[in-house]
Amino acid sequence: MHDFKYKNNRMFCEGVDIADIAKKVSTPFYLYSYSTLLGHYQKLVSAFRLKRPLICYSMKANSNLALCRALVKKGCGLDIVSGGELYKALLAGCPPKKIVYASVGKTEEEIRQAVAKEILFFNVESASELELINKVAKDIGKNASVSLRINPDVEPKTHAYITTGKLTNKFGLDLDTARQILRHKDKFSHLKFKGLHIHIGSQIIDAKPYAQALKKILAFIDKLKKDGIGIECLNIGGGLGIIYNEERPQTAKEFASQVLPALRKTSLKIILEPGRFIVGNAGILVTKVLYLKKTPLKNFVIVDAGMNDLIRPSLYGAYHEILPLNRKPETGNRKPEKVDVVGPICESGDFFAKDRQLPKVKEGDLLAIMSAGAYGFSMASNYNCRLKAAEVMVKGNSFYMARKRDSYLDLVRKDMIPEFLK
Ligand code: LLP
């Protein structure tokens, strides 16, 4: 499942002893395994080989340039949600014809940039957005290709914050509105209506909600056919769950076996846009134990990473496994202890684990917070004026910097003191 494994009780990433990286880079840092990253991408490619979809890695999961470039070099496209991601996607070397752009709130400027670059599709989320893309395309004398994002109103059984395909969510268009738009598509002189898009949520364990959504969308496509409207392309989104704890998510093969039969009967060109599935288990956050502190009620393990580095436990109550880099510290007994692993930030919500049984750790020990490749660094901030962590990539027996740690100068580079305060 991933290339973070113990050898002689020391955790290695591929062929590199992670503690050696910590000595050189200092902590906290994110660590990515190149082979795990590409391995997960390949799993999807081979599970879907009969349909040969375009896989557009969802950059929001982790937009580090080295990661994106590694995937792009293997033929992967990118799913973006902002002008910033478009900028990084192009820097990573992604051909514009492999970029799809979703977001309920694209600004005119962002639309202009993407139309100018002639990206593959805008995944359009409202009628007003469609009008604006048409206007911008007309202004700059180009045509823009669009897919309508459909909200299929299915329950993906995941955390409420990352459920996106129910009609109470802000995403996509309901079927009736989409049909009305498509019936009158000729009024959009500079738009090419190429496809439909669904994305029902994230960290989805079970393939059934996908099958349900797919059934709805294929029935809709049939209905459109009767209206004389042809659809070339179907983007079935991302959202595949990964193992954080004891969940048993669908594998790429199981997922494909649920959705491929229905898709194979069609001539639709398929797009997938997974983020977490590709990068989630390809990354860990390495942190050092600063202090151990006992209170009458708790044992706190205070580490040097905080919720500014990895906010998922604080924001979603998400579980991340925590493992010592060295399974046998020289001193201390190894009996598990119930602890809270917390960061240095001035909030009680700053924790990585609560009441977790961990092998006994001591001050100075290094810990790996597992499955942190997706929505880890990409959701990091400088809260408490903390420096964003370094990012490192291992390939084989070598490691490479993928992003420098922030410096104090980075914290103040953009601040300005008005003249009257000088
Ligand atoms: N496509 C669209 C339109 C999306 O909104 C998303 C994720 C994806 C693809 C990729 O989903 P994935 O395959 O990674 O599940 N911060 C949250 C997850 C937010 C997901 C947002 N949309 C977390 O840490 O769990």
Image (cartoon, grey):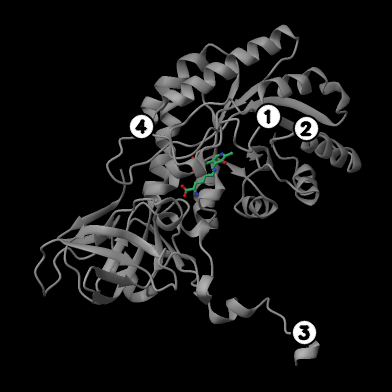
Q: Is residue 89 visible?
A: yes
- Quarter of the figure that contains the N terminus: top left
The front one of 230 and 346 is 346
Q: Earlier in the sequence, mark 2 or mark 3?
A: 2
Is 117 on the left or on the right of 398, as rendered? right
CA separation in Å, label 3 and label 1:
45 Å
Report how far apart the C-alphas of labels 1 and 4 lie in the structure: 29 Å
Q: Are discs 2 and 1 less than 8 Å apart at CB?
A: yes
In the rendered structure, which amino acid carries the disc numbered 3?
Pro
> In the image, which disc is placed on residue 31?
none
Residue 122 vs 52, above or below: the answer is below
- Image quarter in which the C terminus is found: bottom right
Which numbered dot is residue 127?
2
Q: Which mark is residue 418?
A: 3
Helix, strand or loop for disc 1: loop
Q: Amino acid at mark 2?
A: Ala
Q: On residue 251, which mark appears?
A: 4
